[in-house]
Image (cartoon, helix red, strand yellow):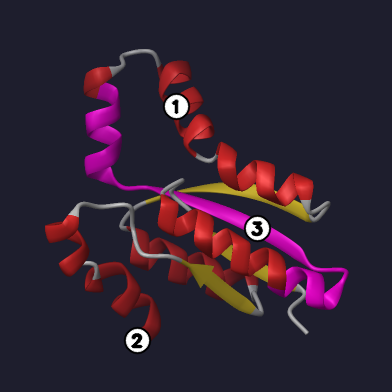
C-alpha cells in the first residue's frame, strides 16, 4: 500500500498525532519505511542560535523535541530514519518529497499559537497545491 512514508514533524502535539496516523499506515503494509523530516527555517534557526551559542545544544534541543515521535516509531517496531531540511517548511517538504518519490506525505498543522494557527494555511496549503 504505502511503502515509503514521509512524516513531517516539528515535535508539536499536532505532529505527534500525525505520527500516529503514519504508524497506522505503515502497519497496513508491513514493510513500510518512514522518513521523518524536521525543517529548520531561517527564523527558527536564528532564534535558536541567539539563545544558545553552542551548536550541540541547539541540536540536542531539536532531538528532544522529536523524542515523542521517535518513541512512538520505536515502540511500533517500524523502519524509520530522520532528515533535517533547511528552508521554508512548505517548499522544503515538497521538494524533498518529490525528489525521493514517497507514496504519501503525512503532516499535522504546525505547533503554533491560536493566531498563528489561523495563518497555518502557509505550509499546509502550499503542500496541497504543489
Sooner in the amino-acid sequence: mark 2 or mark 1? 1
Residue 2 image offset from top left, x and y in percent = 73, 79
Residue depicted at x 64% and y 67%: 22
Label 2 residue SS = helix
Label of residue 35 in the image: 3
In terms of depth relative to the viewer, which is nearer, 97 or 28? 28
Highlighted range, magenta: 25-49
Is the C-beta separation of discs 1 and 3 under 8 Å? no
Label 3 residue SS = strand
Residue depicted at x 47% and y 57%: 15
Q: Which residue is mark 1?
A: 61
User: For this view, does 22 lie left or right of residue 18?
Assistant: right
CA neighbours of label 1 inside 10 A, class few (<14), some (14 to 19), many (20+): some
Residue 53 image offset from top left, x and y in percent = 31, 14
Q: CA distance from mark 3 to mark 2?
A: 22 Å
Quarter the C terminus occupies: bottom left
Instruction: Say which quarter of the image contains residue 101.
Output: bottom right
Image vertical order of residue 87 relative to residue 108, above or below:
above
Residue depicted at x 34% and y 53%: 87
Nearest to the eye among marks 2 and 1: give it: 1
User: For this view, does 24 lie left or right of residue 37?
Assistant: right
Sooner in the amino-acid sequence: mark 3 or mark 2? 3
CA neighbours of label 2 inside 10 A, class few (<14), some (14 to 19), many (20+): few
**103 within the magenta span:** no
Residue depicted at x 45% and y 65%: 93
Q: Which residue is mark 2?
A: 129
Q: Is residue 119 visible?
A: no
Q: CA distance from mark 1 to mark 3?
A: 20 Å
Quarter the N terminus occupies: bottom right
Label of residue 122 in the image: none
Q: CA distance from mark 2 to mark 1?
A: 32 Å
Amino acid at each position: 500500500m504505502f511503502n515509503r512514508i514521509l512524516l513531517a514533524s516539528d515535535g508539536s502535539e499536532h505532529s505527534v498525532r500525525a505520527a500516529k496516523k503514519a504508524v497506522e499506515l505503515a502497519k497496513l503494509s508491513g514493510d513500510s519505511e518512514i522518513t521523518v523530516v524536521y525543517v529548520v527555517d531561517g527564523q527558527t534557526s536564528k532564534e535558536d542560535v541567539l539563545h544558545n551559542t553552542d551548536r550541540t545544544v541547539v541540536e540536542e534541543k531539536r532531538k528532544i523535541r522529536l523524542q515523542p515521535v521517535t518513541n512512538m516509531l520505536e515502540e511500533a517496531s517500524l523502519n524509520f530514519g530522520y532528515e533535517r531540511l533547511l528552508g521554508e517548511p512548505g517548499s522544503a517538504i515538497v521538494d524533498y518529497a518529490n525528489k525521493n518519490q514517497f507514496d504519501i506525505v503525512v503532516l499535522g498543522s504546525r505547533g503554533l499559537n491560536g493566531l498563528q494557527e489561523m495563518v497555518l494555511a502557509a505550509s499546509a496549503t502550499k503542500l496541497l497545491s504543489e
